[in-house]
Image (cartoon, grey):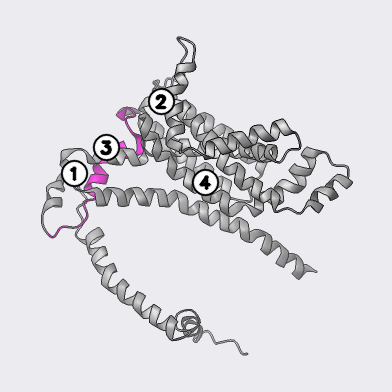
Amino acid sequence: MSRPSNAARPFHWLHAHLFSGWASSLATLTLCYFAWMLIPPLINWAFVHAVWSPQNASLCREPGMGACWAFVIEKHRFILFGTFPVDQQWRPAISIALLITLYALSAIRAVKRSHLVVFWVAGMTAIGILMWGGLFGLTYVNSERWGGLILTLLLATFGIGLAFPLSIFLALGRRSELPLVRWLCIFYIELIRGVPLISVLFMASVMLPLFFPAGLSIDKLLRAQLAMILFAAAYLAEVVRAGLQAIPRQQDEAAQALGLSYWQRHSHVILPQALRISIPPLVNTFIGFFKDTSLVVVIGLFDFLTTIKVALTEPRWTGFGVEAYLFAAMGYFIFCYPMSRYSQALEEQPGRSVIRNQKSI
């Protein structure tokens, strides 16, 4: 079969993907009709007739006006930085930029893992100094004043970063031949997975301090972070265990025949394969965990979504929940979608390598 010419390729693509049959053609025309009916009014509401300046906020309530983005523009500092001191908000702004840079570096496969560890240690140290202060002439800021987007990013970053290695040990412990280790891991995983995250946060915030000696207290943010780490680790452990069960037993037997120890077998043979198999559910759990950070509101922490809700309580901006929650949805999408795309790239990489090796042969 001859390949279509360059001029005919667009028509060939349209026929193959959108008009390959009567059912496909009907679905394409129906979707085009709904797009024609919905997209122009949406553009007019979101951009053409929208109110952008907070000085013109009174126009938002006039008939015929579009979206009131003036709410987001006026409240953007509170949404991004919470109640962090206004004259010091450059510090969480730099922290957000550092976190995004670290995420981007982690997604670049050309960056060596050893260099990446150095970047993360240096970056998180700098973020800690910027957020807390007390050093290099920076004013100390209590963690209770942290909030907004920076709080969500910090909770998600530390939560995922520390829960993932813990989940690997829990998954290995649940498959251990030592009865005590196995049953302890099973008890922990099933206990945590059997209760909602809100109850774990409530226990960490309200009940846990009751067991501390008099005069000893742990920061509320730290307690919330520990609760989220322990909660995420239990769910991730089951994902990792599923990946371990998918590896044929012959892989472990072959590694034993080579004289490898237990940790050598799992670190060099079993775990790399199991984790690659588990990429889709792992990333799905990461994305869910990132959005679950909004539950810290139950213990009095103002994350990204909560700051938007609080900003809406001001009488001047009541009634503009559509714009507020669309902005919140876009914020979560901006951080969750790249995780999904990166996981797809990791899944496709082994296939590309196999194809490349076959061509070289």
Q: Which residues are magenta?
A: 64-86
Q: Secondary structure at mark 1?
A: loop
Residue at image position (60%, 52%) is 279
33 in the magenta segment: no
Residue 312, placed above or below residue 281: above
Q: Give the total number of marks visible in the rendering.
A: 4
Residue occupied by mark 3: 310
Counting residues from the N terminus, which is met first, the one under dot 3 or under dot 4? 4
Residue occupied by mark 1: 318
74 in the magenta segment: yes
Given the image, on which type of amino acid does mark 4 rest?
Phe
* Mark number, residue 286: 4
* Mark number, residue 275: none
Residue at image position (33%, 33%) is 82
**Circle 3 crowding by C-alpha within 10 Å: few under 14, some 14–19, many from 20:** few
Q: Secondary structure at mark 2?
A: helix
**Circle 2 crowding by C-alpha within 10 Å: few under 14, some 14–19, many from 20:** some
Q: Position of residue 187 (x, y in %)?
A: 61, 34
The CA distance from mark 4 to mark 2 is 24 Å
Given the image, on which type of amino acid does mark 2 rest?
Ser
Counting residues from the N terminus, which is met first, the one under dot 4 or under dot 2? 2
Given the image, on which type of amino acid does mark 3 rest?
Val
Quadrant where the C terminus sits is bottom right
